[in-house]
């Protein structure tokens, strides 16, 4: 019987599928770290108080990339090249979601509207990250090899999501509410499509490595399409709502270390 737990366990128990999983995750987290670092450096003067939180966000993402690389190293594995069809962050950027890399590579300060766009994009993608890590935490929080990493990353992603809610509500109060809702909707609708495509590509890669029969691969693909249909019909709305989080000032401190994975 197919289940999320059995599927993840099959991927984690095989060195090649585990290497692909960790390589994709490490690449995405490292890219997020770079993006946040550049945004922090280019924050407009009127929002300089936000820069340390953006830097903390980026430091967390860098840490996650190092953790995934360390998990591979622990099993004597080297990262593999990430197939373009599985590169979630690159595909989002190519679709015009978030801030363009060309803008981040320049030294021109960002505008307040750019910061709002960044936060709206992050609110959507961090929703996805938080949900995925909560699923892994549900099944593998006590796993001897990845349990500590799962718990740490899951907590960080929850912090990131709380931070996005709080800061977007602050900007909404300052008069940016319409732009925030418009940008959130645009990001969410693009994200669910890209997430579907990436999920199909990742599962196809895992299927080749693990030798899944056609019936199993077809069932998994059908499940991915079903999730997309649910999200397209209304599930995307969970990604655009805003409420004051229980975790206030979630990124107000220093990034937590990950020395146990070194």
Image (cartoon, grey):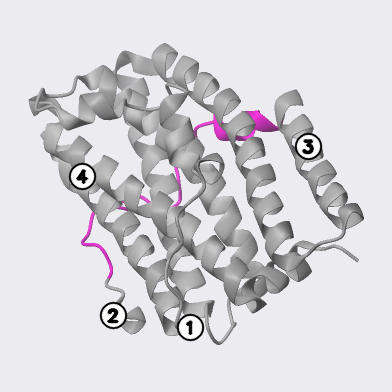
- For this orientation, the residue located farthest to the bottom is 144
Q: Earlier in the sequence, mark 1 or mark 3?
A: 1
Determine whether label 4 and label 2 are within 8 Å by CB.
no
Location of residue 75 in the rendering, given as x and y in whole percent from the top left corner: 48, 83
> Can you tell which of label 2 and label 3 is closer to the viewer?
3
| Residue 247: percent from left, percent from top | 41, 53
Taking the spot 12% from the left edge, 38% from the top edge, the residue there is 41
Q: Nearer the viewer, residue 79 or 140?
A: 79
Q: CA distance from mark 1 to mark 2?
A: 17 Å
Mark 1 highlights which residue? 75
Residue occupying image coordinates x 36% and y 44%? 163
On the image, numbered disc 3 is attached to which residue?
225
- Which residue in the protein does label 4 denote? 37
The answer to which of 250 and 123 lies nearer the viewer is: 123
Marks 1/3: CA distance? 33 Å
Extent of the magenta region: 235-256
Q: Earlier in the sequence, mark 2 or mark 3?
A: 3
Looking at the rendered image, the quarter that the N terminus falls into is bottom right
Could you give the CA–CA distance between mark 4 and mark 3, rounded to whole angstroms?
35 Å
SS label for mark 3? helix
Q: Nearer the viewer, mark 1 or mark 3?
A: 1
Q: Position of residue 214 (x, y in %)?
A: 88, 53
Marks 1 and 3 in Cβ contact (< 8 Å): no
- Label 4: which secondary element: helix
Badge 2 crowding class, 10 Å Cα cut-off, few under 14, some 14 to 19, many 20 or more, is: few
Task: Name the residue located 42 percent from the left edge and 47 percent from the top edge.
Answer: 162
Figure quadrant of residue 81: bottom left
Task: Look at mark 2 in the image and give the residue it sits on.
Answer: 259
The residue tagged with tag 1: helix, strand or loop? loop
For the residues labelled 4 and 3, say whether their Cβ atoms are less than 8 Å apart: no
Q: Is residue 162 magenta?
A: no
Along the horizontal axis of the image, is 57 left or right of 16?
A: left
């Amino acid at each position: 019987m197919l289940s999320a737990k059995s599927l993840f366990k099959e991927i984690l128990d095989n060195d090649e599928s585990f290497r692909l999983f960790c390589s994709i995750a490490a690449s995405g987290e490292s890219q997020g770290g770079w993006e946040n670092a550049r945004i922090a450096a280019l924050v407009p003067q009127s929002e300089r108080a936000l820069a340390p939180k953006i830097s903390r966000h980026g430091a967390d993402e860098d840490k996650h990339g190092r953790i995934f690389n360390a998990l591979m190293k622990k099993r004597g594995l080297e990262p593999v090249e990430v197939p373009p069809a599985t590169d979630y962050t690159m595909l989002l950027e190519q679709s015009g979601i978030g801030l363009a890399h060309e803008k981040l590579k320049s030294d021109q300060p960002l505008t307040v509207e750019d910061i709002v766009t960044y936060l709206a994009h992050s609110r959507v993608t961090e929703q996805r990250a938080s949900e995925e890590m909560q699923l892994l935490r549900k099944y593998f929080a006590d796993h001897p090899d990845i349990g500590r990493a799962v718990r740490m990353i899951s907590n960080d992603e929850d912090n990131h999501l709380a931070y996005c809610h709080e800061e977007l509500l602050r900007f909404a109060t300052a008069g940016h509410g319409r732009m925030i809702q418009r940008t959130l909707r645009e990001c969410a609708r693009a994200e669910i499509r890209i997430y579907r495509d990436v999920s199909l590509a990742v599962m196809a890669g895992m299927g080749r490595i693990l030798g899944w029969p056609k019936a199993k691969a077809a069932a998994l693909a059908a499940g991915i399409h079903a999730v997309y249909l649910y999200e397209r019909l209304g599930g995307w709305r969970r990604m655009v709502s805003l409420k004051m989080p229980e975790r206030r000032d979630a990124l107000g401190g220093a990034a937590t270390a990950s020395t146990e994975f070194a």
